[in-house]
Amino acid sequence: MCNDIKTIFAQKIRDFRLPEYSEIPDVGLYLEQVTKYVNGVIEPLGCPVITPSMISNYVKQGVVSAPQKKLYGRDHIVYFIFIGIAKTVVSIDDVAMLYRKQRELYDVPTAYKYFCDEFYNMLMYISGMQDTVELVGITESKLKTTLRSVIMAAANIVFVKNSLAILRESNDEVKIDTQ
């Protein structure tokens, strides 16, 4: 059964990719458009949706910078994608701290590329489409170790949620061997 679930999960995510930085709209999107875009990216993973009120609260709390004339840019959208995935495993305060520390060292495109590459790396490993977890990036630090752990945990959550959905849709009997 586990191999069947991994096979089905692998088929589902085989062609999945988070959008590249350059593919994300940078024309300025209104709150509803941002919500629709971000949810379109994260919903196929089984991540909870992000609502307009959540985005507004992130701005009010200072987790995300305010939009310019009610328009959100590419960097905002990148951050909301990261939040949508990372908040499945850590608090929003921790997400904000990780993002802030990452921004101290890297520009947004570089940080986002690392996140996308590492997330895909973990999904490929968990699904059985690659035998090892690849080394992504060249630096080693406490921040990278922590980010990698968050990304690994989030990828495992994605796998668990998808596995549960596969089980719900399946008519197979679940047999547990206790020996």
Image (cartoon, rainbow, N blue to C red):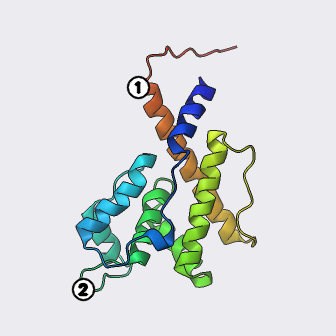
Could you tell which of marks 2 and 1 lies nearer the N-terminus? Answer: 2
Q: What residue lies at 42% left-to-right and 54% top-to-bottom?
A: 42
> Where residue 165 appears, x then y in whole percent?
43, 33
Residue at horizontal 70%, vertical 63%? 136
Q: Is residue 63 at least partly visible in the picture? A: no
Identify the secondary structure beneath mark 1: helix
Left or right of 41, for residue 60: left
Q: List the residue tagged with mark 1.
A: 169
Q: Residue at x 51, y 45 (%)?
A: 158
Q: Is residue 6 left or right of residue 32?
A: right
- Location of residue 72 in the rendering, given as x and y in whole percent from the top left corner: 32, 77
Q: Residue furthest bottom?
A: 69
The N terminus, quarter of image: top right
User: Crowdedness of circle 2 by 10 Å Cα count: few (<14), some, many (20+)?
Assistant: few
> In this rendering, is residue 22 above or below 81?
below
Q: Seen in the image, is 95 located left or right of residue 115?
A: left
From the viewer's perspective, is residue 166 above or below residue 22? above
The residue indicated by pointer 2 is 69
Image position, residue 128 (x, y; %): 66, 39
Q: Residue at x 59, y 16 (%)?
A: 176
From the viewer's perspective, tell me whether residue 76 is left or right of residue 153: left
Percent coordinates x, y for residue 7 in the rendering:
59, 32
User: Residue 134 sits in which quadrant?
Assistant: bottom right
Give neighbour class at mark 1: few <14, some 14-19, many 20+ (Cα, 10 Å).
Answer: few
Q: Amino acid at mark 2?
A: Lys
Element on which disc 2 rests: loop
**CB-based contact (under 8 Å), mark 2 and mark 1:** no
- Total labels drawn: 2
Q: Amino acid type of disc 1?
A: Glu
Q: Within the image, what quadrant is residue 148 found in?
A: bottom right
Q: Quadrant of the C terminus?
A: top right
